Amino acid sequence: MVATEKGKKEKSIQSLFRVFKMLLGTTLFLLIFVLGDYGLYQIYVLDKNTKSVEKSIHDLQAEKDSLIINREKLKNDIAFIEKIAREKYRMAKKGEKVFRVIEK
């Protein structure tokens, strides 16, 4: 009878050890899957960075297009050049009066 109780204890210890190994293996697998170099978190971070870079590229492309249009206007459009000279550099044609508005 003592031998059977000893055998049952060994089997229960072995089964507990087997469960512990399975839990440890599953935990390690999940940690590597989620937090590893190619894990879910890393994929999320890279996706977020990709979207940020794509937005930056789109914004820069729009700015480039705007600058190209302005460059062409500055080369060819006299009215646009006069507008810029008046607004930005406070220039005036002969005979024009320039008024400055002073805010309180």
Image (spheres, helix red, strand yellow):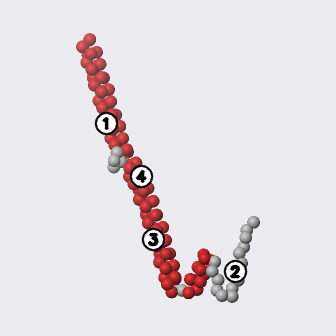
Q: CA distance from mark 2 to mark 3?
A: 37 Å
Q: Earlier in the sequence, mark 2 or mark 3?
A: 3
Mark 3 element type: helix
Callout in the foreground (2, 1): 2
What residue is disc 2 on? 98
Q: Position of residue 19 (x, y in %)?
A: 32, 30
**Of the residues shown, which amino acid type is indicated by label 1?**
Gly
Q: Earlier in the sequence, mark 1 or mark 3?
A: 1
Q: Mark 4–mark 2 contact, CB under 8 Å?
A: no
Q: Mark 2–mark 1 contact, CB under 8 Å?
A: no
**Of the residues shown, which amino acid type is indicated by label 2?**
Val
Give the vertical position of 47 relative to 87 (above or below): above
What residue is disc 1 on? 25
**Of the residues shown, which amino acid type is indicated by label 4?**
Val
- Which numbered tag is attached to residue 61? 3
Q: CA distance from mark 4 to mark 1?
A: 26 Å
Q: CA distance from mark 4 to mark 2?
A: 55 Å
